[in-house]
Image (cartoon, grey):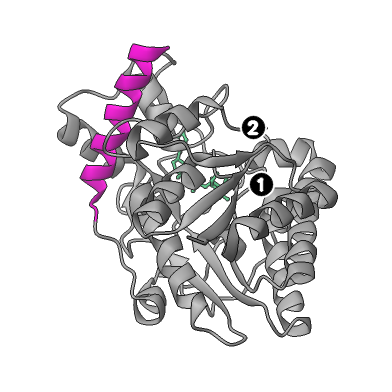
Amino acid sequence: MKLNQVIITGGAGYIGSHTVVELIHAGYEPVIIDNFSNSHPRVLDGLERILNRRPQLFEVDCCDETALNGVFESCLQQGNIAGVIHFAAFKAVGESTAEPLQYFRNNIGSTAALLAVMHRHGVGSFVFSSSCTVYGQPEQIPVDEHAPFLPAESPYGYTKQACERLISDAHFAHSELNVTLLRYFNPIGAHPTGLIGELPLGHPNNLIPFLTQATAGLRDPLTVFGNDYPTADGTCVRDYIHVVDLAKAHVAALNWLQDQHHACEALNLGTGNGSTVLQVIQAFETANNIQVPHAIGPRRPGDVTAIYADAKKAKKLIGWECELSLEEALKDAWNWQKKLGETS
Ligand code: UD1
């Protein structure tokens, strides 16, 4: 039987690994490309336990066009390539300010290399991992896909904007290229089995990994970055989406792309609900019946006051919407943290 393969760069990462699971459930054959620069090979063990088999992996740097070409050639000997999902990228805002060259080279270079290899082999479906960071501090919330890109706050944010532009330009030039640009809001949670989840290397920058580690006693109390914003309780508002819902959106996008003839669409992936930092802490405490040690601290430079998604376009176009609640995501995040504690 010929395999219906999907090349998934960064497939050992947080969102990538959850997407591998959903692709297999949907009948696709994921082929992971990952160089473990910000992930760990043990993710493959978790995937194997969930799926009862080990997904195929190529340990390759996505900026290496020759090596990428080799992966495509090897896949084409086994079956067809239904599409490419491109997660592999650096994503730490602060680090990008210190290491802008690395961010430009890695995030933009890998996207250009992938598009070139796809074009060479006539592979037409491309799902790109973008971010709501492209909107900056939006003038209107909920924010829809027509909102303009505002000047990026960081080199990381700029690479997402630049990649979207690069992909759109390639789409205009290459008639076979169909694209979805998926703009994620704030992915949180873990697989309900507790076998895969977010594995931040070192000090976590994002709210939920820091919160769970602080609650587990592995870190100092969580600092709430500012309570003097013009929001309901003074803390910032975000749209927190369960990573399993987000993973399913990639399958829906890929399915949709199979029937397109020269499409390029940006889609917001969020719940449509905003929660403040204090509301998230409260929801975590209620969902898990545990106290979160925390204190109010100063604002974090570069934080947007409030952003949440208008996700109606994704529902209309690809038939996807969130099914899981904030509480479920926070339960799964805590379950994952506890399991990590047992194994480390
Ligand atoms: C950040 C990035 C975004 C990126 C995403 C994924 C910025 C401005 N945005 O999103 O571009 O795509 O990460 O890496 O950096 N918070 C605390 N205490 C903490 C950590 C966070 O109060 O210790 C607050 C933040 O102020 C924010 C919320 O929690 O209001 C969420 O923060 P975070 O998880 O870092 O995500 P974003 O900043 O929304």
Q: Nearer the viewer, residue 214 or 113?
A: 113
| Secondary-structure class at tag 1 | loop
Examine the rendered structure and indicate whether residue 94 appears above or below residue 253.
Answer: above
Q: Nearer the viewer, residue 342 or 135?
A: 342
Magenta residues, as a range? 324-344
Q: Nearer the viewer, residue 304 or 227?
A: 304
Q: In the drawing, what numbered circle is on residue 37?
A: none
| Circle 1 Cα neighbour tier, 10 Å, few/some/many (<14 / 14–19 / ≥20) | many
State the image quarter where residue 85 is shown: bottom right
Q: Is residue 261 magenta?
A: no
Examine the rendered structure and indicate whether residue 93 appears above or below residue 290.
Answer: below
The quarter of the image holding the C terminus is top left
Q: In the drawing, what numbered circle is on residue 36?
A: 2
Q: Give left or right: position of 200 versus 51.
A: right
Q: Give left or right: position of 229 versus 201.
A: left
Q: Give left or right: position of 138 versus 283.
A: right
Residue sitting at x 45%, y 58%:
28
Mark 1: which amino acid? Ala
Going from N to C along the chain, the mark reached first, 1 or 2, is 2
Mark 2: which amino acid? Phe
Q: Position of residue 342 (x, y in %)?
A: 33, 13
Ligand 1 lies under 8 Å from the Cβ of mark 1: no
